[in-house]
Image (cartoon, helix red, strand yellow):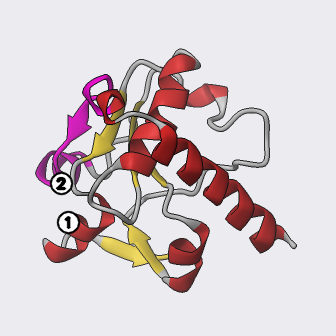
Amino acid sequence: MKKKLLGLLSLIFAAFGLFTTFALSGDVPMMTKDELKAMLGNPGLVIFDVRLGSDYFASDIKIKGAERPEYGTKKIVPPEYSGKTIVIYSGSSNEVISTANAQILIEKGYTKVYVLKGGWEEWLKAEYPIQKK
């Protein structure tokens, strides 16, 4: 049941991203994989894995230190993350889903929100640090 709910919510976010104009990407800052790699382990860093449910659950790995936001709650991001650098990645290199999620956080007042340029695909290609979920 929980997986179905997460999958449905992921689809809703994907649909939102698909209907959002590509102009949004200009409103959300990007972070390169090299910049993110250099920040790994920093206590002021939060990494969110927003891959679609099917992609997320089909894999047993993620970017080292990444967490999955709780879409089923009113607060996508806990208040204690305010002031931290938040980097969002999805499974696609086109960043539409990541951008849509980042835009929501920016609208909620988070100021240090970035989309991982190239997303999960580019991170894996670079063979950068990953870990089991």
**Do the numbered discs 2 and 1 sit on residues whose CB atoms are within 8 Å?**
yes
Magenta-colored span: 25-39
| Residue bearing the label numbered 2 | 33
Q: CA distance from mark 2 to mark 1?
A: 7 Å
Callout 1 crowding tier (Cα within 10 Å): few <14, some 14–19, many ≥20? some
Q: Provide the major secondary structure of the magenta segment.
A: helix
- The amino acid sitting under disc 2 is Lys
- The amino acid sitting under disc 1 is Glu
Residue 8 in the image: above or below residue 15: below
Callout 2 crowding tier (Cα within 10 Å): few <14, some 14–19, many ≥20? some
| Residue bearing the label numbered 1 | 122
Residue 110 in the image: above or below residue 76: above
Sequence order check, earlier mark of 2 and 1 = 2
Q: Residue at x 29, y 58 (%)?
A: 119
Q: Residue at x 46, y 36 (%)?
A: 20
Residue 13 in the image: above or below residue 78: below
